[in-house]
Amino acid sequence: MIKFTPIAALLAASLNFGAAQAQEVYGKLGVLGAGVGYAHGLSPSVTLRADFSTIGSIGHDGNSGDFDYEAKIRNNVGTAYVDYFPFEGNFRVTAGLGLRDTRATAHGRPNIAGFVDIGDAVDIPLGPDDRADAEVEFPSVAPYLGLGWGHNAGRAAEPGWSFFADVGLYIGRPKTSFSVSDSVRASLTAAGYDADAEIQKQRDEIHDEAKKFAVFPSVYVGVAYRF
């Protein structure tokens, strides 16, 4: 007669755990670009995943206060996730850690008359050789929290295609900077402004806009192939 000891129980559980393992590869598309990834099911309740997504480099025209700019935005993110399926179905809660290169560089854009506003200073000349530059850079390491549907690679199922969706947040306050060329600083002074004060005002306005994205939204949909 074989006794069912605690050690035997742990062995049986580990064998059952391993039997549930399966894998997926997937592609996704969303607000932070397009990406590809891999998922490995550990059990009907837990899947491990990793993916990489990119938006490349895109142009964007906007303003901060009265400062008009032309910007280039770059976003490259690699993230490792742990998916937990509380009901062993498709609904999941996800935690992860992202390594990212997410930043925006912006250059002052003069109006049709060739002027730009900086801080409270208006109609400051901005010629081809003048510079008024801003940069917003997000932390390279960012925690991720989200909810989703799909990717339960540990649940018993036949190989094949499936749909998934993710809604989540990357967390991390960005750093900002703003600087002008000596010629623009001279133009501020010549117009009767305190150049340092106006530059600081513009820097603060850019920072106030950027910090709204300290909690950065991430929304994706995609398809996965289980094997």
Image (tube, rainbow, N blue to C red):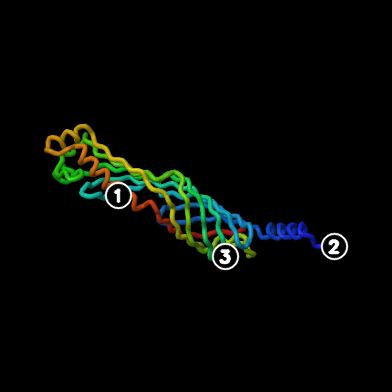
**x, y percent for residue 41:** 61, 57
| 135 displayed left or right of 41 | left
Instruction: Quote the CA–CA distance across marks 2 and 3.
Output: 34 Å
Q: Residue at x 29, y 41 (%)?
A: 134
Tag of residue 16? none
Camera-side residue of 207 and 147: 207
Q: Which residue is mark 3?
A: 86
Packing grade of label 3 (10 A; few <14, some 14-19, many >=20) is: few
| Percent of width and height locating residue 12 | 74, 60
Amino acid type assigned to the residue bearing label 1 in the image: Asp
Q: CA distance from mark 1 to mark 2?
A: 69 Å
Residue 139 locus on image (x, y percent) = 42, 44
Tag count: 3
Amino acid residing under circle 2: Ile
Q: CA distance from mark 3 to mark 1?
A: 38 Å
For image coordinates 75% across by 57% down, the residue present is 11
Residue extending furthest toward the top:
182
**Which three-letter amino acid code belongs to the residue tagged 3?**
Pro
**Disc 3, disc 1: CB below 8 Å?**
no
Q: Which residue is mark 2?
A: 2
Residue annotated with mark 1? 208
Answer with mark 2 or mark 3, whichever residue precedes in sequence: 2
